[in-house]
Amino acid sequence: MPGTITSVYPDSTPMLIAHRGDKIRQPENTIAAFEAAHGLGACAIQTEIQFSAEGTPWCCGDDVLQLSSGDGKRPFHQFSDRELSRQPLTTFSHLVDWARRHRHLDWFVEVDAKSLSRMGERAVASLAEQFPEECESFALLSRDCHSLRLARSLGCHQVALKVLSVAQSLCAEVVTLAPDYVFIRNHRVDCEELPPGPWQWVVYEINSAEEAVRWRDRGAHHILTGNLPLLMRSREASDVYGF
């Protein structure tokens, strides 16, 4: 029902979140992609994290990597920092340095289940210690409630939870956690309107202006898109998301 979102969340400004930056025009999860998204007017960017053999966080969405030299694929965590530094990849520390110069951008930093299983709490701690102090623009994104509770205890101002269904968002564990954001894939929503909660809904991955407008009407506060240039050119999306 139009108007419901702003009445329940009066301070919620709808965001188009660039998935891995502007990955249409630049290599995804790189400073070039983040700069391109910023240049288009994005107000938020989502990136994924993988960890090297030394435990250094890198911006990468794949847990298996093939070197640009064409060598065989290996799990990301088997590569050393020295090997990764020769690839077109960005360390998380480099991202944070760049983000300090663009403080109006919000960031969603995702750590996957495999990394959490392999590294445990060290994965969360290594990211939390690099989040800028007193900065509310970074949110840790995960499917694991325990990891998000840990992140909060380590000083993370915002956390975001990925859920598999609307029903999962209503379970006691999630309601007790009360994440700042809940991410859900569009085809996983089995109700006409997303139910209100103590969080803001992010629906992904939406790559057309018509879908972006429709999901706003269905209760999505924000949209994660893999085609930022297309949505930024849309008058319909502009009217709803205010860019």
Image (cartoon, rainbow, N blue to C red):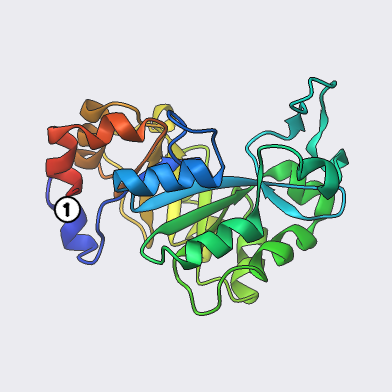
User: Which residue is at the front of the view, 60 or 119?
Assistant: 60
- State whether residue 148 appears in this view: yes
Residue located at (37% from left, 63% from top): 198
Residue located at (12% from left, 45% from top): 2
Judge left or right: residue 53 versus residue 204.
right
Examine the image and state in which quarter residue 74 appears: top right
Judge left or right: residue 128 versus residue 182.
right
User: Which residue is at the front of the view, 72 or 198?
Assistant: 72
Give percent across and percent down for residue 171.
51, 52
User: Which residue is at the front of the view, 209 or 150?
Assistant: 209
- State whether residue 178 appears in this view: no
Q: Residue furthest bottom?
A: 134
Give percent across and percent down for residue 102.
41, 63
Which of the image's four quarters has the N terminus? top left
Q: With respect to residue 122, does 72 lie above or below?
A: above
Q: With respect to residue 75, does 176 lie above or below?
A: below
Q: Residues within 10 Å of mark 1 (few under 14, many from 20)?
A: few
Residue located at (43% from left, 37% from top): 22
Give percent across and percent down for residue 174.
52, 56
Number of marks in the rendered image = 1
Judge left or right: residue 103 versus residue 133.
left
User: Which residue is at the front of the view, 206 or 57?
Assistant: 57
Give percent across and percent down for residue 49.
65, 47
Q: With respect to residue 98, does 184 lie above or below?
A: above
Secondary structure, mark 1, is: helix
Q: Amino acid at mark 1?
A: Thr
Residue highlighted by disc 1? 4
Residue located at (42% from left, 32% from top): 226
